[in-house]
Amino acid sequence: MGLILDSSVLVARERQGKNARQALESVVQDIGDAEVAISVITLIELAHGAARANTPERKSKRETFIQELVTAVPVHPVTTSIALRAGFLDGQNRARGNQVPLPDLLIAVTALELGYDVGTANLRDFERVAGLRIVRM
């Protein structure tokens, strides 16, 4: 079993003053023994947050967090299979009047493709993806 982390989990732990190693250790304590990974989309979201930091110190701390994270966990790309599955799911959802933000949809589909759960604090968006197992964090 594995777990794809949404940025909400990592941002919350970073805001608690944890470095990437400590953040990942706390995730493992919460979920037990499972492979932890991220989607490249989560990496984009974290980089966006670093760029928007309101002080040079906070920006540097966030950039260090990201560098530590990418050396500690696998980063899964958006593959052709993930892109097609996300497109089909998005089309089906929108036909029913249900819209999932594209970044969250891509993270969710990455988890589905790998047979993993998603670890998130953002239940609202991820609950709208059929078949996705969610771990509230």
Image (cartoon, rainbow, N blue to C red):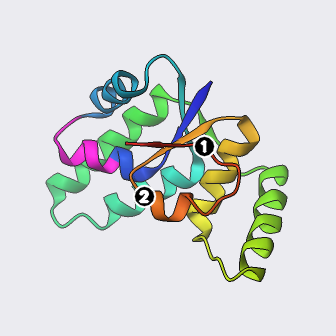
The residue that disc 1 covers is: 133
Q: Which residues are magenta?
A: 11-18
* Disc 2 secondary structure class: loop
Instruction: Judge left or right: residue 95 versus residue 49.
Output: right
Instruction: Judge left or right: residue 84 versus residue 9.
Output: right
Residue at 70%, 56% (x, y): give it.
130
The correct choice, above or below, for 67 with respect to 105 in the image is above
User: Label 1: few (<14), some or many (≥20) within 10 Å?
Assistant: some
3D distance between C-alphas at marks 1 and 2? 13 Å
The circle drawn on residue 122 is 2
Residue at 61%, 63% (x, y): give it.
128
* Disc 1 secondary structure class: loop
* Residue 1: x %, y % from top left: 62, 24
* Residue 3: x %, y % from top left: 55, 34
Relative depth, front residue between 57 and 106: 106
Amino acid under disc 2? Asn
Instruction: Judge left or right: residue 118 versus residue 82.
Output: left
The correct choice, above or below, for 87 with respect to 15 in the image is below
Main SS of residues in magenta: helix
Amino acid under disc 1? Arg
Task: Find out whether residue 112 is within the magenta segment.
Answer: no
- Is residue 77 in sight in this rendering? no
Task: Find out whether residue 12 is within the magenta segment.
Answer: yes
Residue at 73%, 79% (x, y): give it.
96
Relative depth, front residue between 82 and 29: 29
Q: How many marks?
A: 2
* Residue 10: x %, y % from top left: 36, 44
Please report whichever mark, 1 or 2, sits nearer to the chain's N-terminal start: 2
Residue at 63%, 76% (x, y): give it.
99
The circle drawn on residue 10 is none
